[in-house]
Each structure stands twice: as structure tokens, then as C-alpha cells.
Image: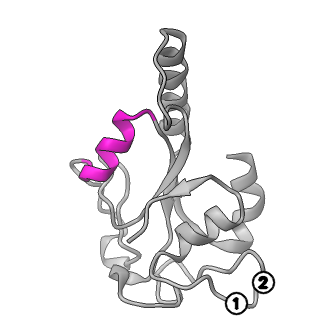
Amino acid sequence: LARIAQLDPQLNSFISLTQELALSQAKAADARRANGETGALLGAPIAHKDLFCTQGIRTSCGSKMLDNFKAPYDATVVAKLAAAGTVTLGKTNMDEFAMGSANESSYYGAVKNPWNLEHVPGGSSGGSAAAVAARLLPAATAT
């Protein structure tokens, strides 16, 4: 989370950070490990592309129209990753309604390529791509 706070203002790869959720999920993953549970994804930090519904968390699809929408349920991929013990750090930026190829049409602003801030990472999952490329986290959902 500290690295995201340091680097993301230049990249704009995240729309929302879920710090409280992340800390809660990390604590739960630690407890599961302490009880002897193992798993490839247990405790792994991830982010979700902002088109995947995440219960109680803003899911805007990169659009002003959905800026205040909080999903009433988790998308299947979100639920399955949570059950595996992942730690959700936030929701990543994307082209509005995933309709683009440069990640420049988001209501929340364009995403920058972490290797060259004058370029874009591509889209529509550019926020996820930029966050992983910048080593803000090891994995993120995308489409």
C-alpha cells in the first residue's frame, strides 16, 4: 500500500484503494496460515479491474455514470480469489466500460505506462497492466 501511495499518483493505475479490506484480508490470511492452511494464493496481494463487482466497494467501470455505485455482490472471480485467501488492494483504472484500447477514455483520467510516462499501457485493462508492471502488486484481474 505504501508503494501504491508513492507511485500511483504518476501512473493513475488505481481508481479505488481498499486499505481497510486489505488489512482485514491480510489478517485473515495470517490466521489461516497459523492454523496450518496453505495455498498458492493465500495472502497474495491483488487488485481487480474496476468492471468486476466487489461487494460494498465502488465499481464504476471507469464511468462517471457509475461513480457512486457500490456492488451488492462479488463477481465470481472476486469471490473465488477471496476464498483462496487473496488480499484485495483496490480497483484498477480502465477504459470506460472497457470500450477502448489505450486506457485514455476513463472518467478518472488516463493511465500512464510505468516504463515511459509519455506512453499508455494499452487497454482496456491498462490500470491492471500498469500496476503489475510497476510492481505495485504481483497480479490483477483483467479482461
What x and y, as percent, mark residue 31? 50, 15
Above-or-below relation of 63 to 22: below
- Label 1, on which residue? 119
Task: Give, as a three-letter code, the residue at label 2.
Answer: Asn
Q: Is residue 13 above or below residue 140?
A: below
Identify the element where label 1 is drawn. Answer: loop
Amino acid type for the residue under numbered disc 1: His
Residue 118 is situated, as x and y percent measured from the top left of the image, at 75, 90
Q: Quadrant of residue 135?
A: bottom right
What residue appears at the point 39 percent right and 35 percent down from the top-left corner?
84
The residue sitting at the top extreme is: 35
Residue 97, position as x, y percentages in the image: 33, 80
Depicted 107 relative to depicted 33: above or below: below
Q: Which mark is residue 116?
A: 2
The residues bearing labels 1 and 2 have C-alpha atoms spaced at a distance of 6 Å
Residue 133 left/right relative to 74: right
Q: Which residues are magenta?
A: 74-85
| Front in this rendered view, residue 24 or 28 | 28
Is residue 78 a member of the stretch shown in magenta? yes
Q: Residue at x 21, y 49 (%)?
A: 72
